[in-house]
Image: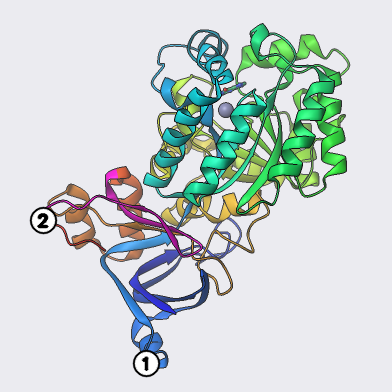
């Protein structure tokens, strides 16, 4: 039994729905046994009740639930920073040539290790990972993920048109390879499988039906894809599916829109699409850095919330600008500010919820992770800025927890991540500098 003593902040409830959803404990503690949280309470109370528990002293920083990144591409870590292009040109010139290199499983293994260590180093403990087009690269990925201890929900990406020939498969092969991967990896350790057609633009009705067949046969499996990202992409999809009511319908008609579906972007939805997404209780994964970088547009968060659509956050590496969910939170805030009257004002509690609990809900993992409630796994990120940094100064002078949390999102980076745990296992520890005591 361990007591993690720290300033605690979490959002066990949805701040878009209830007031006072931000829970904080200044000198708090989590009582953890075998990776599970038994209690969150003021440190003196838990210490008195459990005098023999080992204390892990994390004072001087803030302990948050581990971040949940609901849209991030494993094969794209090496092509981050491809600026100056819109979505379709960026795919052709920057991204797909790299994705083709993952045909080599040794290359894929090196990329997987780089990708997973970047997730952990940024405090992400659970990720919905867009995979590779190659089944061999997915086996390598799941093996490496198991080694790190991170929670991953991931799947082979499938496409059968309009990319590069070496990235294309067939409906039959997509089904057979998907089935084998699900049987090998879904529910193995901390991994789950997500059926993942790249987007309707690169998927025929036949391959979407093959995806639907997998979803029908394996009810616990998740679904993810892209939707309504850029105006040009939407126009091409309209031409490819003349019978579809809209972009969502290309997935809906194949049985791919469910409570277990996470659709990335949705920057340009119609009213019907929002209503249908709300009815199925599926999620829109908002990727604000990617939308800014690729010039995709300003995400209509308020329209999503008004329609009742659940929204989570994703980094969209490599269309995005890195692995930091703090940066995504800040960029989400900026974009709502820029929308003026049409924007949704975001308080620090909203940013924390979007980066943690909302992602857990998107993946239907809210009983396991996303906040510090009793019974949840101890999945956590310890943010402790280096002495002398601007963030350390601002935190020291912050008037109250909301201001401290706002400072973490405004100024925090990967350099402030001092420790990360999944189910009580430490998956990242910042290398000690000479002036720093290890935690
Ligand atoms: N942002 C983004 N959008 C996509 N649409 C289809 N593929 C991709 C991708 O790799 N990144
Ligand atoms: Zn993406």
Q: CA distance from mark 1 to mark 2?
A: 32 Å
Q: Residues within 10 Å of mark 2 (few under 14, many from 20)?
A: few
Which span of residues is magenta-colored? Answer: 415-434
Q: Is residue 432 above or below residue 216?
A: below
Residue 8, given in percent of the width and then of the height, sits at 38, 68
> Relative to 155, is 54 on the left or the right?
left
The residue that mark 2 highlights is 435
Could you say which is closer to the camera, residue 439 or residue 391?
439
Residue 34, given in percent of the width and then of the height, sits at 52, 72
Q: Residue at x 64, y 8 (%)?
A: 164
Residue 295, given in percent of the width and then of the height, sits at 49, 19
Q: Secondary structure at mark 1?
A: helix
> Relative to 436, is 1 on the left or the right?
right
Say which quarter of the image contains residue 136.
top right
Q: Residue at x 50, y 47 (%)?
A: 147
Cβ of mark 1 under 8 Å from ligand 2: the answer is: no
Q: Secondary structure at mark 2?
A: loop
| Residue 147 on the magenta segment | no
Could you say which is closer to the camera, residue 36 or residue 101?
101
Q: Residues within 10 Å of mark 1 (few under 14, many from 20)?
A: few
Q: Which mark is residue 48?
A: 1
For marks 1 and 2, give the one nearer the viewer.
2
């Amino acid at each position: 039994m361990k007591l993690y003593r720290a300033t605690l902040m979490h959002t066990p409830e949805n701040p878009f729905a209830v007031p006072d959803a931000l829970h904080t404990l200044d000198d708090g503690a989590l009582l953890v046994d075998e990776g599970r949280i038994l209690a969150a309470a003021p440190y003196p109370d838990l210490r008195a009740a459990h005098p023999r528990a080992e204390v892990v002293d994390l004072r001087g920083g803030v302990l948050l639930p581990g971040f949940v990144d609901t849209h991030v591409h494993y094969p794209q870590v090496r092509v981050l920073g491809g600026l100056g292009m819109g979505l379709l040109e960026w795919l052709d010139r920057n991204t797909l040539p790299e994705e083709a290199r993952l045909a080599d499983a040794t290359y894929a293994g090196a990329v997987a290790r780089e990708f997973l260590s970047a997730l952990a180093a940024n405090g992400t403990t659970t990720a919905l990972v867009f995979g590779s087009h190659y089944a061999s690269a997915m086996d390598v990925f799941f093996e490496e993920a198991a080694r790190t201890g991170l929670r991953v929900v991931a799947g082979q990406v499938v496409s059968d048109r309009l990319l590069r020939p070496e990235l294309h498969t067939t409906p039959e092969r997509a089904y057979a390879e998907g089935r084998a991967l699900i049987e090998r990896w879904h529910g193995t350790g901390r991994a789950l499988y997500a059926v993942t057609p790249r987007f309707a633009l690169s998927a025929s009705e036949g391959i979407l039906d093959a995806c639907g067949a997998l979803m029908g046969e394996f009810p616990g499996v998740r679904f993810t894809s892209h939707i309504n990202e850029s105006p040009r992409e939407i126009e091409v999809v309209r031409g490819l599916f003349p019978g579809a009511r809209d972009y969502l319908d290309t997935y809906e008609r194949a049985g791919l829109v469910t409570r277990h579906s996470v659709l990335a972007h949705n920057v340009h939805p119609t009213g019907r699409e929002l209503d249908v997404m709300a009815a199925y209780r599926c999620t829109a994964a908002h990727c604000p850095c990617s939308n800014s970088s690729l010039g995709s547009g300003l995400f209509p968060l308020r329209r999503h919330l008004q329609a009742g659509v659940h929204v989570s956050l994703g980094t969209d590496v490599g269309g995005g600008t890195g692995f930091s969910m703090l940066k995504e939170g800040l960029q989400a805030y900026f974009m709502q500010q820029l929308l003026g009257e049409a924007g949704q004002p975001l308080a620090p509690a909203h940013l924390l919820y979007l980066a943690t609990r909302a992602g857990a809900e998107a993946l239907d993992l809210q009983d396991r992770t996303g906040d510090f409630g009793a019974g949840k796994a101890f999945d956590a990120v310890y943010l402790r800025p280096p002495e002398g940094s601007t963030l350390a100064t601002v935190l020291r002078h912050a008037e109250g927890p909301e201001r401290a949390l706002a400072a973490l999102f405004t100024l925090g980076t990967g350099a402030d991540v001092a420790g990360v745990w999944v189910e009580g296992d430490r998956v990242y520890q910042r290398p000690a500098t000479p002036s720093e005591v290890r935690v």
